[in-house]
Image (cartoon, rainbow, N blue to C red):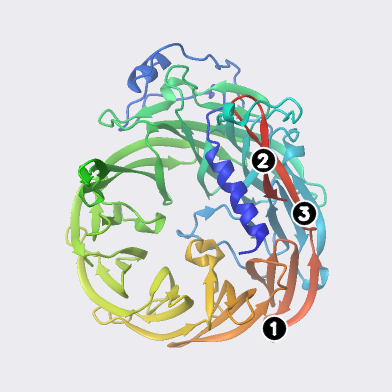
Amino acid sequence: MQRKDLLAITALMVASLLLTGAIAVLVKPGHDRTNNGVLPSFENYNEVRSFIGATGHQQSWYSSAESGAGDKVAASALTSDVRHSDTNVQVEGVDEADSIKTDGSYFYVIASDSVSILDAYPAGNLSNVSKVNMHEALGLDLHYSVWINGIYVQQQKLIVVASVSGPYQNYDYNNSAPLTSMVWRMPEEKTEVAIFSLAEVEHPVLVKTFGISGSPITSRMTGDCVYVLTQQCIWDRVDLISPKVIENDTIGAMEASDIHYDPSSSDISSFINIMAVDVKTLASNYTSVLAGYSSTVYMSHSALFLTFQKMTGGGPIFLNGNVAVSDSSQFQYTTSIYRIDIDGLSMVPAARGEVPGWLLNQFSMDEKDGYLRVATTSGWGDSSNDVFVLDSDLNITGRLEGLALNERIYASRFIGDMLYLVTFRQVDPLFVINLTDPANPRLVGELKVPGFSAYLHPVDADHLIGVGMIDGSVKVSLFDISDPEHPREASNVTVPGWSYTQALYDYKAVLYDPEQRLLVLPITSYDNRTWNITSAAYLFKVNGTQVEMAGILTVPQNEYLMRALYVGEFMYTITETTVRAYLTSSMELVNKLVYQDWNEYYFPCLMGTGEVVAVAAVK
């Protein structure tokens, strides 16, 4: 990994660690509290403090200012008849924030606290158009840290989701306190949604901002509404900081009646804040759930599912008679699930449930016909894997347990009434599970092949792509699933030498063009003879029952490939500085644009005494 990649990761980790509760919102006009859902809410903040075991006084951040729907902005969609790639998402029709978006005419590319807008099509027009800087747009100086978490593009609007922390104080190098007196102090952090008009794409105009306290967990977008979830850790139960919400420059405390809780929960460490913003009407709504750490979030067209992992057991083991450690083999894992029904700006906690085990990621959940299907792993060393089907009240109605003992789930994909599950320890078992009868999930087929798949992507009704590893190299498998009882690996390609792809942990890096049946992956390879590290877009063609290497688009060694996209007849590779355009038919380079220079900057980290240390980041 290149030094600049390590710097970016370091900066992101530091920003994630600096969690806090900070700024927030307003009284919502016409708010109906007659239906609080299955999770009750509080009458006042005294009840909130009492529930989490806090004593002392409540900080008063409440603002009685009413928030209107805001000025409506005409939205004529950017129309493009040119076929183009979209963000690879889990649920069709539920968009997910990404670092790079295209509407068929322009590219929108995140670089730390900025978004570069590039003319994309045709490739001969490749050029810089404009740039949105979030520090400037939000009116913040460098005493604040701003990190863009993702963007959406819809109806001549750019929607930016960004985390903001600070303010930080300047570091006095001449009169600094001894290092031993420095203690980490959590800065205030909020997550902002900034909506920019692209009516004149050369001059994006900030229309309105919305904010909610806490660090970002994830976001989704359906129709005109963006849903943003944040984690606001409860660091101080005495001087409790309530969730805050913001509209433009107006700040207020979330009302206690908008904060929900589970009476049976004993592990309370965070406010899970949810903000819904209608980007067309510029109206908003907010709610919160008192809970533990939210590990995985899944969203269908009608509901958000929040999950919270719990661990119990694990008695002490004594080594040499005097050292006690936890016995991890005795840990019991369970996952609590809350369903928040959504309908535009309406968000109602509708159900709660629990399943044994822990989830790998959001692909471990899927909703169909009112049932939530969940795949979990229980334990670590002596693990097993299970599948549960939950009804609309999140009660378990069907289960299939004890799959692949001593292994754990590496990938899962729900497709219709079928679940394709990959576990791994020595070989890669692909399980085919029939979920047609919610009360009786059935294992109908199994395949074992070397290596493992960490991501599964549907090709058609009879084929499934697996992206994984074998012996230190990237492996792409094409599975034939036409006979569920006898799945088989129809074909595979292994990238020569040591190689790795970010698609193993970031499915949005996967590009699949169903019309051309073309799979594109960003792959980093290492030559152990020359020690050269190469970053490139690898193209794989799916021809019938065969997957074959179709080409390699390499970038210079001082660059790192982030994504590949297609617009019309062109394939584009995008690094942190440069866009290159190729004719897809011939892989001929037709144009190139350096859209930004590479440089490093430093953002401050707040210490307990007010001093600041600098941590390298990327801009």
What's the amino acid at mark 3? Answer: Asn
Residue type, mark 1 in image: Met
Residue 171 occupies which quadrant of the picture? top right
Q: Is residue 601 visible?
A: yes
Q: CA distance from mark 1 to mark 3?
A: 30 Å
Check if mark 3's residue and mark 2's residue have beta carbons within 8 Å. Answer: no
Disc number lying in front (1 or 3)? 3
Callout 1: SS: loop
Name the residue beneath numbered marker 1. 587
In the rendered image of this protein, does residue 332 appear above or below residue 414? above
User: Which residue is denoted by mark 3 in the rendering?
Assistant: 599
> From the viewer's perspective, is the residue at label 3 or at label 2 nearer?
3
Q: Is residue 187 left or right of residue 131?
A: left
Work out whether mark 1 precedes mark 3 in sequence or the reverse, and give the earlier one.
Answer: 1
Q: Left or right: where does residue 601 sit relative to residue 193?
A: right
* In this view, 550 is above or below 21: below
* Distance between mark 3 and mark 2 Cα atoms: 17 Å
Structural distance between the alpha carbons of marks 2 and 1: 38 Å
Q: Nearer the viewer, residue 94 or 110?
A: 110
> Against 281, is 498 above or below?
below
Residue 512: image quadrant is bottom right
Percent x, y for residue 369?
31, 55
Q: Quick one: quadrant of the N terminus? A: bottom right
Image location of residue 319, percent across then percent down:
23, 47
